[in-house]
Image (cartoon, grey):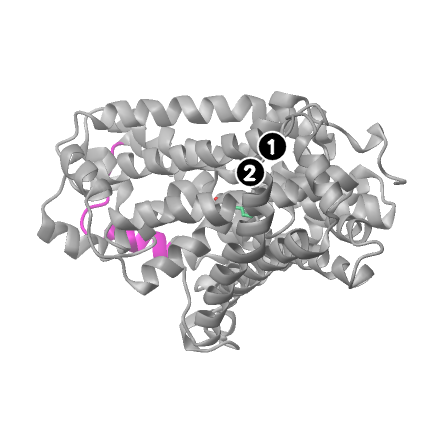
Amino acid sequence: MANGSNERGRFGQLGFIFAAVGSAIGLGNIWKFPYITYANDGGSFVLVYLVAIALIGLPIMMAELVIGRRTRQSPVGAFIDAAKGRLGGRAWGAVGALGVLGSFILLSYYALIAGWTVYYFGQCLSWSVRGFDLEGQALGEAFGGFLANGPLQVGFHALFMLVTVGVVTLGVRRGIERVTKLLMPVLGAILLLLVVNSFWSPGFGEAIRFLFHVGPVTGHGLLEAVGHAFFTLSVGMGAMLTYGSYMTSRQSIPRSAVTICFLDTLIAIMACVVMFSIIFSVSAAERAATFGKSATILFTTLPRMFYEMPLGVVLAPTFYLLVGFAALTSTISLLEVVAAYLIDQRGLSRRKASLLAGGAVFAFGIPSALSLGASGALSTLAPLGERTAGFFDTMDYTVSNWVLPLGGLLTAIFVGWFFSRRASSQELAEGHGDVGRWYFVWRGVLLRFVCPVAILWIIWAVIGGRSFA
Ligand code: PFF
């Protein structure tokens, strides 16, 4: 293994956890999860989601960490290495390539949305100082205007990419580990503060009831829960595999993966408590009129609600700062996937690789940035059908509905059926000790059968024309 030496970089034990949790926790937890939970009527949807995390997300995350640490390579080289002498051989490298491509595309619009949080952080600072003055529909209209403003979109996207590139250029330990170790505790503290604050909100009781009541789950809800499990845990795209390749052998893969899944879920539920306490503070009629079941409540209604709350002037900017931090630790991991590929596979220096990858992602993000109203042609183009009109939606549809499930499926099948049994059991025991019968549950049951069947069901539904956010 030519690249197995320490010069690739190595996380400290805690550093790995912070980095991986940072990758997992992002817009998916604080933005997407609350709104899909709201749209799917809470309660049982949350339960299904927990099951999806435990039975599908967790085993695939462990599979990615196993391949990454075993081979100490970025996704393409890792799959090629791991598949040596196995059926399919080098062709498995395509799974890694799919991950690199997926990370590239996802980052191109994820950083764009992340840029919005920076813009709204600035807006909130200014509202906090001069007073909030957007009543009624004005906030929604302002958001629409912001989306349609090409230079602003491209500018904030560039800003976010620049910071991401800066961190990745500094490397695994000095960049990624240091920044995530700093940001994640701050993020946890801010969110805890917001949760404690919501205890006094008039909507708190109803928020909790909504989150934990038992009710029917639709087929669409099931699909969305499984799909989101991939997104939120950063699996299916080589991000966990890449971070796994920097993990020390002294660290337990099962314990780390359980910790990451637990913290990711905890933060998602906390974000729901915060958001729903605000949302349920208004009357049902007003809720129906202002929220619909829209994905954009974070920018179209939430600021106004913040400013109606006591301490809103502090809470509003703090909240957007939190979302921005969460997004940054995820964009870092996405860029690292692409950069690590260029370093390991193409022999570039880290500096060159980060700059090149970051520059290319930025450029590819421009059509997305302009497809939210700035450019008529880009905003309406619909190669995959009317439901995904616009470049941005087309990219999101492709990654969320195709790349992530497909990457997850092939990873599960590879480790379940093709990768050496001895190598995977050794790697799981490394830093952990004998895992006993759990090994069979993980590989023999979950990776071999449960995950493929569940994911094939998703893919089948997508082929049938269903899509999820
Ligand atoms: N897990 C991130 C979130 O929930 O926002 C998104 C993400 C990051 C997905 C990195 C995939 C990935 F490789």
- Tell me the kind of residue under disc 1: Val
Quadrant hosting residue 206:
top left
Residue linked to disc 1? 435
Q: Which range is magenta?
A: 131-145
Q: Is residue 167 above or below residue 397?
A: above
Q: Which one is nearer the viewer's eye here, 441 or 300?
A: 441
Q: Which mark is residue 438?
A: 2
Residue 457 on the magenta segment: no
The answer, for residue 113, to whether it is visible in the render is no
Q: Which one is nearer the viewer's eye here, 316 or 43?
A: 43
Q: Element under label 2?
A: helix
Q: Classify residue 365 as left or right of residue 287.
A: right
Q: Element under label 1?
A: loop
Q: Residue at x 62, y 38 (%)?
A: 164
Rendering coords of residue 133 (x, y %): 23, 40
Q: How far is disc 1 from disc 2 in space, using C-alphas? A: 6 Å
> Going by the picture, which residue comes out furthest to the front?
437
- Tell me the kind of residue under disc 2: Trp
Q: Which one is nearer the viewer's eye here, 212 or 119?
A: 212
Rendering coords of residue 432 (x, y %): 64, 26
Rendering coords of residue 460 (x, y %): 48, 71
Q: Residue at x 49, y 49 (%)?
A: 56
